[in-house]
Image: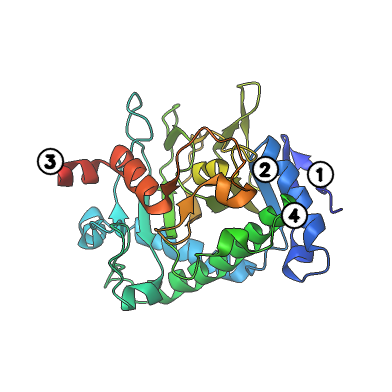
Amino acid sequence: MVRAAHNVHGIPIVDIAPLRNGENAVGVGKALHQASSEVGFIYIINHGIPETVIATARDSALKFFRKNEAQKMTVAINSAHRGYLGPGGAKMENHLEADAKESFIWGCEELDRLSLKDHPLRGKNQWPDFMPGLKSIATDYFTRAQEVARFLMQGFALGLDLPVNIFLRSSEKPLSRMSFVYYPPHHENKYGVGPHTDFGVLTVLYQDAVGGLEIESLDGTWVTAPPIPGTLLVNVGDLLARWTNGAYRSTPHRVINRSDKERLSIVLAYDPEPDTVIDPREIFGPACDTQNDPITCGDYLTWRFEKAFSYRKAESN
């Protein structure tokens, strides 16, 4: 069995090379299983995305966010959740202040060309005219991160002693989204992102060296998830917790940028096709005792997005 090399603040570090190359996929799966059953967050190494690709994406994202507001608003968020979302555009819980972060969001470019209209979160990407190279850089990163997510979904299946592709049976046209997320510097305890759990199946995160991410431990205290060079940070989302009938934990987390520096993260929200039924009885068999009714991935995300994003509330009024 592959064991975590060590852990940082209780978050294990798992080498996924034996999963990617097939040398010990089951062993990695068991390590992912243990981490997902406990803390719900995992640092991964040997993920396959070159550091040069990450650095280029990060530099391009910062260049975008440093443009003036008028320029960024030329690609303002559209109804398919593509484009620029400014400060205050998201609120994770009703009782919290709106998030201080800014985001630039895109999805699979190939699916845009197919003009798929099977879900409100599917649609045309928006690329800024003032940064003509951003499309190719962002698309390349998206493709690579999707590959990492697919390997991880195979690992989770193996960790549960399930067929390797059971979570990938309807993933040819994924509903995944990717974001550059910018956190301005702060000298106060203002949330860049308020406490929340992630909506979908799986999150694959690059965070820069600034830090600020905190996760809620099992005893209810908040611990930092510091940046570690060469790693990506992976966490279970609500839909994967639901899909595994609670075997995997969707852990609350938040971001507070207490530094005097800009913070940048690159986030893949991996989700399968919108009509994928999230029902643990389809995974573990009809005898599985579950508290949740079946729901499609698309319906669940629609519900969560309408609660979290102010522009969608405005559109529905």
Residue under label 1: 6
Residue 194 on image: x %, y %:
43, 33
The amino acid beneath tag 1 is His
- Residue closer to the observer: 156 or 64: 156
Residue under label 4: 29
Report the residue at 35% width, 49% height from top.
299
Answer with the quarter of the image where residue 179 lies. bottom left
Label located before the other in sequence (3 or 2): 2
Label located before the other in sequence (4 or 3): 4
- Give the Cα separation between the discs numbered 3 and 2: 39 Å
- Give the Cα separation between the discs numbered 2 and 1: 15 Å
| Label 3: which secondary element | loop
- Give the Cα separation between the discs numbered 4 and 1: 16 Å
The amino acid beneath tag 3 is Asn
Left or right of residue 17, residue 279 in this image: left
Quarter of the image containing the C terminus? top left
Report the residue at 77% width, 49% height from top.
31
Q: Nearer the viewer, mark 2 or mark 1?
A: 2
| Label 2: which secondary element | helix
Furthest residue toward left: 317
